[in-house]
Image (cartoon, helix red, strand yellow):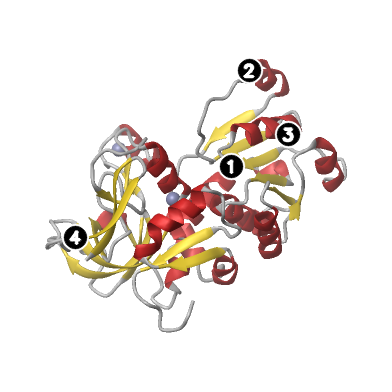
Amino acid sequence: MKAARLYGPGDLRVEDVAPPGAPDAGWVKLRVDAAGICGSDLHNFRTGQWISRSPSTSGHELTGTVIELGEGVDTVAVGDRVVADSRFWCGECAQCHAGRRHLCASLGFVGEVCDGGFAEQAVLPARLLHIVDAALDERVAAMAEPLAVALHAVRRLPKTAGSVLVVGCGPIGGLAALLLSRSFAGTVLVADRNQARSARVARVTGATIVDLDRDAIAAAMANAPLLAAVEATGSIAAFTQLLGVLDSGGAVAMVGIFHGRLDIDPNLLVEREIALLGCHAFADELPDAVRMLGELSDPLLALIDRVIGLDEIPAAYERLLAGKSDGLKTIIRMRQPVEPA
Ligand SMILES: [Zn+2]
Ligand SMILES: [Zn+2]
């Protein structure tokens, strides 16, 4: 079968490999239907930061159909359509016991600690699989995982904030704007240097586009204070600018993956009571995200940039890393769709 495997930083190869054998006890074999390319896939490709085995089939945003069960699996059945929890948690440490699996002491991710979804077949632990409605478009189902990430970031924000600024209109920023537009009472503002991307997010979510400067934001907010933001760029420059436009008492849900280090005066946070909220993957939000997929199908499809085949993944990485994407999400479809995408 075909698989896209990461060998080292900058070294991703689409190759023919032996399909996985029969799944071990507690594991399940899937025919992968679709998978999404994530910013963290690009980060790992660029830096090698999370490479723990080589080669490893990449891809943690996947949906597939169950084709074989390992011994003892009774939570899914052959023929079920599923999405995968990307978090490879242990289930035994204190954090896992407390229900904080995203903070598991030995947390790894699908595609890194085990082979992931950029392949025609995948084998995963049954405990990571969630059944989805068989009628869902596979491109939509492949977005369950990033939707859960966005949901977690949105839920980290204080409920009382009213209006929210989303900085960065990539996949997570766009999905956060979509969720905020449906759950927060106030205005949703979006900012991105790429105008085509912010325009698409504004069109799909109804958010208002702003520049990252105080005057523009004050005008958009009718001079009400800005007390909540989602940082979804991973850019030190954008984050620094964001701290400059956030009002005292504000909170930032930080979900972008950064390259580089921050140099700030901590007194800025102390004196202005700014809360920085790290957001790592998601906590219990995946089942909620799965439940939302049907209702959100149309806007989710409208946020997809391109649908490609497995062979096109290296070129897509290159294009995305070069910032040549005006859409949000690139989805890999393992087989030719019945109708053109
Ligand atoms: Zn992801
Ligand atoms: Zn654990």
Q: Secondary structure at mark 4?
A: loop
* Gap in angstroms between the C-alphas marked 1 and 4: 35 Å
* Gap in angstroms between the C-alphas marked 4 and 2: 51 Å
Residue placed at 27% from the left, 66% from the top? Answer: 120
1 or 2: tag closer to the N-terminus: 1
Q: Is residue 4 above or below residue 301?
A: above
Along the viewing direction, whichever of 120 and 288 lies nearer the viewer: 120
* Gap in angstroms between the C-alphas marked 2 and 3: 15 Å
* Gap in angstroms between the C-alphas marked 1 and 2: 21 Å
Q: Label 2: few (<14), some or many (≥20) within 10 Å?
A: few
Q: Is residue 116 left or right of residue 61?
A: left
Q: Which of the two discs, 3 and 1, sits closer to the camera?
A: 1
Q: Secondary structure at mark 3?
A: loop
Residue 138 visible in the snapshot: yes
Q: Is residue 108 left or right of residue 279?
A: left
Residue assigned mark 3: 246
Residue assigned mark 2: 266
3 or 1: tag closer to the N-terminus: 1
Residue placed at 56% from the left, 54% from the top? Answer: 324
Q: Is residue 279 above or below residue 151?
A: above
Q: Is the distance from the Cβ of mark 2 to the nearest ligand 1 atom less than 8 Å? A: no
- Disc 2 residue type (three-letter): Pro
* Gap in angstroms between the C-alphas marked 4 and 3: 50 Å
Quadrant location, the N terminus: bottom left
Q: Which of the two discs, 4 and 2, sits closer to the camera?
A: 4
Residue 296 image-quadrant placement: bottom right
Residue placed at 47% from the left, 68% from the top? Answer: 307
Residue assigned mark 4: 17
4 or 3: tag closer to the N-terminus: 4
Q: Is residue 208 left or right of residue 31?
A: right
Residue assigned mark 1: 233
Residues at circles 2 and 3 in contact by the CB criterion of under 8 Å: no
